[in-house]
Image (tube, rainbow, N blue to C red):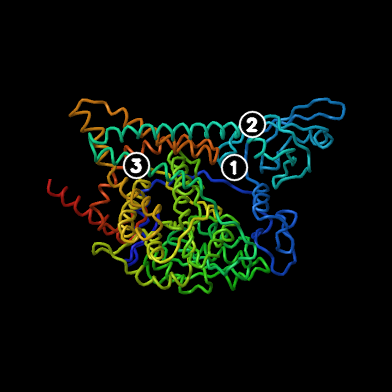
Amino acid sequence: MDDKKNQSAQPPVNAKTAAEILKQSMANKEDVLLHTVNDRRMLPNVPDKDKKRTTIDRRGIDDHKHTESYSVSIQKEKTGRRYVVDYAVKIEIRDKDKNKKVITGRAVNLSSSGISCSIPNEYQESIENSAQVKLTFQIKPGSMPEGYETKIKRLAAKWVRTYRDKDNKLCCAFQFDQLLAQYIYKNRQCYMLSISAFFMFFICLFIVLLRSSSIMYFSVNKVLYLYSIIAATFLLSRYLFGALYRPTPINPDFTPAVTIIIPCFNEEQWIKRTILSCVNQDYPVDKLEVIVIDDCSNDNSVEKIKEIIADLSKERGYAIAERVRYHVQPTNAGKREALAAGAAMAKNELLVFVDSDSFLDPFAIRNIVQPFQDEKMGGVSGRTDVVNTYTNALTKMQSVRYYIAFRILKAAEGLFDAVTCLSGPLSCYRKDLVLKYSDAWLKQKFLGQKATFGDDRAMTNFILRSHRTDYQDSAVCSTIVPNTYKIFLKQQMRWKRSWLRESLITATYMWKKEPFMALSFYMGLLVPMLAPIIVIYNLIYIPFTHHVFPLTFLIGILMMALLMSVAQLFLRRSTTWVYGIWFCLYYEVVLLWQMPIAWVTFWKSTWGTRMTAADLKAYNKKNKKEGMADGGK
């Protein structure tokens, strides 16, 4: 459960009615997800406190002390991750006499260091006795992490072993002579890096020159050109500060006690995977606790929670019974109430909030605690990636938007230790601060209305007044994003309401923070609030009253869109970069106009993406009105 999905502080919804409404109103489209090959153990990344096993050959760890830097160890672990795939592989082999044979196999799993393929039985001896192997295959988008999607041509490899899979098919495992990441960088990504760097410089220069005209013509229309200057300054400064940001490095000896709290409501599809990812952490067993708070779900969430805890308990040496717990709320009270209940139950000094449809990287906890070496640090946000990127065009747009929002915009705030939103999918707080502000957080009202969403921004506001907040880019989780426009638009509407509400609160104290951060914040507040008026003025008023085509304004929008996309290409070197352009255009045409609606709908407490009590009440009220209207015809 995340800021996309919550429940209001109302009596529980009738289960049957809510399920029927959801089934009718939301299309259930299947997401395209990465599938990793399961380890023979459920918790391969957890250090064994009894020291009965070692992971030295897999991650460079000996007696749970890294013999090399953590960054190298983490990179080794990522290199060894195997993904379930299914595509044709052309296998060229030569024997000792240079005789060539071409075999068509089928890839069954793939990592950056090697591949396993199913092959016809008659070629087993030829492959095992081969002196040279060349592999050609196409990595399909979505089968490996972003940036790997490309065609691999005649990559040198060597045969490692032959085995039979569960269906008794003959399979051969090959080890690449060079890592896929190195091959792809050499053959494609180095060019993408150079081209994107050139275009980023060109676009930034073009924007500066374009806005210099605003200074020249400032006296003609002071308000309009002042906005143009502020918007350009804000955007370029975000990219500059984001580029200067660096995550806090890992101190292997800093492992404070952590409690992970997972609020859950009707999340039977993902909750088992979420819990497993939270337990399977490269973190001392005696310093990590997991608490799941089910907010009176009316699906099979509780059964799924019990199942995964029972399965984990079978793994000996990890004290699952003592450190993994769940609690079911007596009524559907809301996400804040669930988090507050978990905080009250927690034993440890740091609290990590994780949404029930978000999945932690095995090193997320070790990374996210590092900024707390600073005693004034009150909260830290991790990075959230999109796990269902390749489902459709909408999820690809969101993937680009998420990455830029975290790696650039949130990183820019992190540079000044003043992150304004510690994001719901993965964030960490000092327990004493959460308990201190818990009562005010639960009772928060705005303009007389109870705040039922924007939980992460609200808690951040309480903490940021007196403490620092940071962003840790190396602490990564992945989350499920909406794959239909209907749900996406409802989510964005809710986010804009909470952004506007909490930003107005932040504005009352941000002036006390670092001057550059304060100035940047107020510019960032002003730009989106006035954007609808500026667009109407430039695209409607000017053309119809002065008969002037708004070429400069349109070029400015295009440059902003290109900057976002090229930054994605530069940082991630993924083929999804072009969807940044489409997202910016979609924002100008559709999402921008949600802001005026947000101005006048603070009172709304419905979520739209989840049939909470408030949503059910609104739904029945709407049907009643429609019924009365039909009856009067």
Residue 364 locus on image (x, y percent): 57, 57
The span from disc 1 to disc 3 (Cα, nearest Å) is 37 Å
Check disc 2 and report the residue beneath it: 187
Quarter location, residue 461: bottom left
Point 30% across, 57% down: residue: 504
Point 52% across, 43% down: residue: 32
Residue 457 locus on image (x, y percent): 38, 59
Quarter location, residue 1: bottom left
Q: Which numbered disc, 1 or 3, marks the residue closer to the eye?
A: 3
Badge 3 element? helix
Q: Nearer the viewer, residue 257 or 612?
A: 257
Mark 2 or mark 1, which has the lower sequence index? 1
Local crowd size for mark 1, using a 10 Å CA cut-off: few (<14), some (14–19), many (≥20): many
Q: Type of residue at label 1?
A: Met
Q: Quadrant of the C terminus?
A: top left
Q: Type of residue at label 2?
A: Asn
Point 59% across, 73% down: residue: 322
Q: In this image, 138 relative to 301: left or right?
A: right
Check disc 3 and report the residue beneath it: 231
The label shown at residue 208 is none
Most distant residue in the right direction: 97
The span from disc 2 to disc 1 (Cα, nearest Å) is 18 Å
